[in-house]
Structure formats: C-alpha cells, structure tokens
Amino acid sequence: MTERARLVGFNHIALEVDDLDEALDLYGRLFEFEFQGRHGDHMAFLGMGDQFLALIGGRTQPPDEARHFGLVVDDKEAARAAVEREGLEIVPSRGLDFRDPWGNHFQVVDYRDIQFERSPGVKRKLGITHLEKTEAAKAEIAERDME
C-alpha cells in the first residue's frame, strides 16, 4: 500500500451543453467518434478507444476562459477546417483552441505532435496505426523514459 494513489490517466471528461441533441449533431460534424449511447435525456457518451467524452445537458456556467481541456485528434488541420466551417469562436493561441456554442473551451492537439501514446489495440480500434510521431514528440517520449 502507498500513502497516495498515483494518477494514471483519464477515464472520461464531462462537458455541460445546453441541448444534448444539438451538441451531438455539432460534434458529429466536427469529429469522427464512436457513439456509445445515451443515459436518458440528459447524458450521451462519445467514445475514443478506451476513453470517452460525456455530454451532460443543462449547462449553467459562463463560457470557459482559461479552463479548457486538450482533445487529441488524428488530423488537427481537418479539425481546424471543420471548426471554421461551423463558424465557431477560435480562441487566439499557439495551436487550435475554440469554444463551442455552450462555452466549452477545446484545445485541439495532433496525436503525432505529443508524448501521449496509445496502446497497439487502442490504435487499431481508432484506425490510427499509420500515424507516426514527430521527431520532437519522439524526443520528448525518450527524455521522459516512456519508450
């Protein structure tokens, strides 16, 4: 037994939206994902291999400013094109940050550019076995002894 539990990852992130059906429609135009179902009229689940995004109807807080989450995609430029096509608010940043109509602040990063690594089975499920990490990402992985 240890004195503290070690953080080992995320199971899911929950986002509040005003209208669940509208959110499912919008996110379906922005991203490809595995729809994992609904829980009544107030929750829906978007699968990303062994993780998921939970959508909860009934957002009440103001738009997110500094608070955000990083969403990993297989093609950041395709995500940028979809965000622009939808006319969503792009937040000035080094990469691709945007807010959805309910004020959730997304930071989109490309899988190839980061140290985040998926297991072979999850990569197969997500259809990303062909993606190669950039040299900078490989160096970061090696530097942190995660090869």
Image (tube, rainbow, N blue to C red):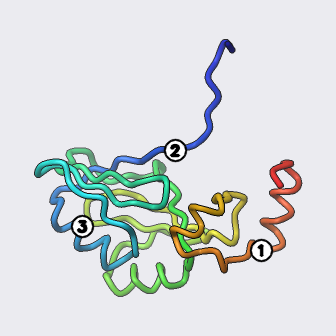
Neighbours of disc 3 within 10 Å: few (<14), some (14-19), many (20+): some
Element under disc 2: loop
According to the picture, the residue beneath numbered tag 3 turns out to be: 24
Placement of the C terminus among the 4 image quadrants: bottom right
Q: Depth check: give the residue in front, 42 or 87.
A: 42
Task: Look at the numbered discs 3 and 2 and tell me whether their residues touch, using CB distance below 8 Å.
Answer: no
Identify the disc placed on residue 134.
1
Identity of the residue drawn at 30% across and 55% down:
45
Give the left or right position of residue 133, taking residue 34 as reference.
right
Kind of residue sitting beneath label 3: Leu
Whole-percent x, y for residue 6 in the image: 65, 28
Q: Depth check: give the residue in front, 47 or 140.
A: 47
Kind of residue sitting beneath label 1: Thr
Identity of the residue drawn at 31% across and 82% down:
86
Neighbours of disc 2 within 10 Å: few (<14), some (14-19), many (20+): few
According to the picture, the residue beneath numbered tag 2 turns out to be: 10
Q: Is residue 10 above or below residue 32?
A: above
Identity of the residue drawn at 67% across and 12% down:
1
Kind of residue sitting beneath label 2: Phe
Give the left or right position of residue 106, taking residue 144 as reference.
left
Give the left or right position of residue 136, taking residue 43 as reference.
right
Q: Which badge, 3 or 1, is on the more N-terminal residue? A: 3
What's the CA distance linking mark 3 and mark 1? Answer: 32 Å
